[in-house]
Each structure stands twice: as structure tokens, then as C-alpha cells.
Amino acid sequence: MLKFDTQRAAYHDFADMLDTDIYEQLPDDWLVGITDVIDSTSAIASGRYKDVNYAGASAIAALGNAWSSFDFPFVFRGDGAAFAVHPDRLTSATNVLQQTAAYARDTLQLGLRTGLVSAKEIRASGSDVKTAQFAASGAAIYAMFAGGGLNWADRQIKEGKFGILPSPARTPPDLTGLTCEWAPIPSQRGEILSLLIESSDHTKSQRFAILARRVLAILEAGERGSHPVPDDIAITADVADYLGGRGWSDVVSNSDYRRYDDVLRLTLDCTVEQIGKVEAILAPARDRGEIRFGLHRQSHALMTCLVPSGNRNAHLHFLDGMGGGYTKAAAMLEAQGSDG
């Protein structure tokens, strides 16, 4: 199983992940890493959805392959990733991030911003970084983050602090197991919704959890809980072999379409009515200064897959919207201002 700490419990109900009291502090000497595609909006506008998602997930694959283990906390964020690194891995992580940024530049023609900052420095800023584990299935366990530290680190790295420059060398990162070759997944219920909800700094976490659970209750009502990956896809024998002998049902179970990393991130197949009800809850909360949110509607979802060569049964599947997804939702959220 893909865990970063086998001694810690993994939660099976995603709603539990909204209770930040269950999260544990990352040790001071650990590093938080951030990557994001520079000007992903322009790349998406030119139709390069798959390239952006591939670059966004590339650091996760490259780090795990370099260490022959995916036992570190990480989260896919559409046009980038966030992760935590043990201090003993600092040198190797720096080298891998340099290689990955160079690969994005030279092969994908995308700028990939990367950086590392210590948990201690994050706390000195007034933010925190805490982690918990969510079991999407028996074989796929995802890290979740809370405390505001990822968002603080992301802003700092975008401002040029704690950055890592791409390597001038031509040594490519090992991206074995990472693929974006799956066909786009059409909505079966109306629209694929990309939704981001972020608590304002002054909003109590319990109050945010109550609001977020109201939103989830609406979006998960009805058929299959608005899961964007359909159950009824037949796969060939070679695809099943690629997935470690598992069938499509494992792809559905292992999909990361809900996550929390200082921001509630959802990729769901919703009805128009559901989206309207959610907006009716979120807009007043935004106007009261309790949250910021961004959403984007599109016809299809995209799936980026990571199948670790050392444990293909523990394959992971990252979801985003094909029509701009998290990137366009983030633009709407950021237009509402920052809490610093």
C-alpha cells in the first residue's frame, strides 16, 4: 500500500478529512515541496490539457521512482503538486526537481516552477503544515494537508523565494509508470465540475468543515456520489496486466477525485441543479468573508495515472477537468483576493 507512515491510521470517510484536528504536524526539519506549471492558463487555452497535467504530476512520479518508494506525503494539484520530504532526502529531492523542471522545459516546452521550504520556516511565518491519510481503497492511500502551510509555501515560491533552478544537464527524470494516455471521460450526469474552496484565515476550521460537509452532501447525493469515473468501461488484457492484473473497478476505487490540501479540491460529475445549489451556499459565505471559492464546468474529465513498477497493484489515478479544470477554478478563486 502507498503509505508514508504505516503506524498512522488512514481514514476511510472523506468527510473526516475536513476535521483538521485529526491532522498531525509535520516535523520541523521536514521539507515541503511545491511545483507548478508557469502560465498554465495559456497552455490550457491552446489545448494542452494533458501536457499540463503530466507536468503537474511529474515530480511525484520522479521522486517516488528515485527513492523506489512512494512512502512520502504528496498531492496532485492539476498544474502542479505538493509534497513533504524527509531531511535525509533533501539532496536527492533537489536533484530530481532540477531534472524534472529541465524535462518540462526541454520536452514539454513548459516552465515548471519548483521549490523546497522547511516546515520550521513555514511555522515561523505563522502558518502550519499538518498531514493525515485518506484510504481511497485498500491499496491506494493519499496524503491530505492542513494548516495553511502549503498555500503559504506556494505563494513564496511563486514570488521567487526557496526556488530550485532547472538542471542544465540532460539527465532525464525517471517517469516510469506515469501516463496521460487515457481517453477523456465524458460527463454522464450533466457537467464535470472542478471546484476549489478555501477557508479564510480568520474562519474557524470547524465552521469551514460544516460548510464543506453541506457542499459534499449535495454533490454526493444521487447516483454513484458524482464519481467522475464510470463503472462500466471494459479494458483489454494488456491494460489489466499494466494495472497489476486488476480490473477497471480498481481504477474507479483508486481515483483521487476528492482531496484536501489547505483547499478542498473536487472533480465531480454533477447535474446542473447540484451545481446551482452549491453556488447558492458558497456565494453568501464568500460575501461574508468566510471563504474563497472557484469553480469551472466542462464536458469531460482527464485522468493521469501512476502505476508504480514495484507495486502495480497500488496504482493511483489523478483527476482534473479537461476544459481547464483546477487551473481555471483557481483563477476565479485568486481573483477574490488573498488573505496573505
Image: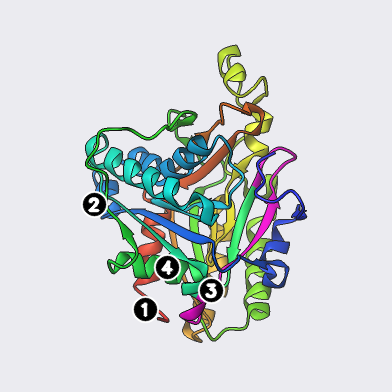
Tell me the CA gap for discs 3 and 1.
16 Å
Residue 138, quarter of the rendered image: top right
Q: Earlier in the sequence, mark 1 or mark 4?
A: 4
Task: Identify whether 163 is placed above or below 320.
Answer: below
Name which residue lies at 58% across and 52% down. 73
Say if mark 3 contacts mark 1, CB within 8 Å: no
Q: Secondary structure at mark 2?
A: helix
* Residue ID for mark 1: 337
Q: Nearer the viewer, residue 128 or 18?
A: 128
Q: How far, Cα to Cα, is label 1 from label 4?
A: 17 Å
Q: Earlier in the sequence, mark 3 or mark 4?
A: 4
| Residues in magenta, as a range | 123-141
Q: Residue at x 41, y 41 (%)?
A: 58
Q: Amino acid at mark 3?
A: Leu
Mark whose residue sits in front, 3 or 2: 2
Q: Is residue 68 visible?
A: yes
Alpha carbons under labels 3 and 2: distance apart? 28 Å
Find out whether the residues at labels 3 and 2 contact each other: C-beta distance under 8 Å.
Answer: no
> Left or right: 198 with respect to 94?
right
How packed mark 2 is, by other alpha carbons closer than 10 Å (few <14, some 14-19, many 20 or more), is few
Q: Residue type at mark 1?
A: Gly
Q: Is residue 161 above or below residue 103?
A: below
Q: Is residue 88 above or below residue 26?
A: above
Which secondary structure lies at badge 4? helix
Query: Badge 3: few (under 14), some or many (20 or more) residues near its Cα, within 10 Å?
Result: many
Q: Label 4: which residue?
A: 153
Helix, strand or loop at disc 1?
Answer: loop
Residue 282 circle label: 3
Q: Residue at x 56, y 50 (%)?
A: 268
User: Mark 2 sits on what residue?
Assistant: 42
